[in-house]
Amino acid sequence: MSKKQILYISQEITPYLPETEISIKGRELPQAIQEKGNEIRTFMPKFGCINERRHQLHEVIRLSGMNLIIDDNDHPLIIKVASIQPARMQVYFIDNEDYFERKAILSDKKGEFFDDNDERAIFFSRGVLETVKKLGWAPDIIHCHGWMTSLIPLYLKTSYKDEPLFEKSKVITSLYNDRFSGKLNTDFSKKAMMDGVSETDIYNFIDPTHKKLCHAAASWSDGVILGSESSEILVSDLDIPVLEYQGADYIDAYDDFYNQILKQEEKVLAD
């Protein structure tokens, strides 16, 4: 298959955050797919614990300056970028003082989940899609990693479905055991509403536990990858392609899966 354009949206990427199943794939996968001759863009949240000086982050003025309204409040969108030199790979960061200034990721020093993690996920998801629009870059595949990206597939199939840049994009969700206890704010689905999203569309996000968020994300995706060896998220009820857990040597299988998803679209168009 010819060169692909692949957008990676990841909750965590090393070396900016500690090594986890998600952060390691967030670092290794884009590089490996780029080295196969494809074009990639990579996004993650700019959590306040990321050392901007050490990692040489700088603001991209031409992409910043937009305000996103969440729960009737304006939140400025700030875009920063850094390079992972050995990988020849740039990473774009979604930033905002209200949501990402604190020196932590998802929990406070006592291990308590932040009350506004729901809004942080909404801001991150919308911020990525709006920034890609500003970049004017049309991805063939959009690959989401981590529960914070769970709204991306929904938004792509509803609010952004008529955007020319995303018209042919296929979205893949990787499911991990990045679970959190309890649930997000009970108003999560209400806050996540946008033009083009109906109450029926958002229904599966009403009870925002980790398991239900991830299943809802999968239900709006064109394909699912099991990123953890033992996943609690069951997707057997969904009529979409599923790539089983691949272990350490996963790059070729992921690339083949991308091609499989894209060939399905070609088959539909041919029919």
Image (cartoon, rainbow, N blue to C red):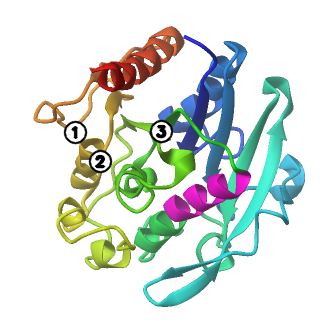
Identify the element where label 2 is drawn.
Answer: helix
The amino acid type of the residue labelled 1 equals Ile
x then y, percent, for residue 271: 27, 21
In this view of the protein, which residue sits in the foreground, 157 or 110?
Answer: 157
Number of numbered discs visible in the structure rendering: 3
Disc nearer the start of the sequence (1/2): 2
Task: Kindly report the distance in space between the C-alpha atoms of the residues bearing marks 1 and 3.
Answer: 24 Å
| Upstream in sequence: badge 1 or badge 3 | 3
Give the CA separation, mark 3 to mark 2.
Answer: 20 Å
Residue 263, visible in the rendered structure: yes
* Alpha-carbon span between mark 1 and mark 2: 7 Å
Instruction: List x then y, in percent, for residue 43.
Output: 63, 47
Q: Which residue sits at x=19%, y=59%?
A: 204
Query: Which residue sits at x=63%, y=69%?
Result: 100
Q: Residues within 10 Å of mark 2 (few under 14, many from 20)?
A: many
Q: In the rendered view, does 218 fall on the left or right side of 4?
A: left
Mark closest to the chain's N terminus, 3 or 2: 3
Reply yes or no: does residue 125 show up in magenta: yes
**Which range is magenta?**
124-135
Disc 1 residue crowd, few under 14, some 14–19, many 20+, Cα 10 Å:
some
Q: Which residue is mark 3?
A: 169
Residue bearing mark 1: 233
- Whether pointer 1 and pointer 2 mark residues with C-beta atoms closer than 8 Å, the reply is yes
Disc 2 designates what residue? 214
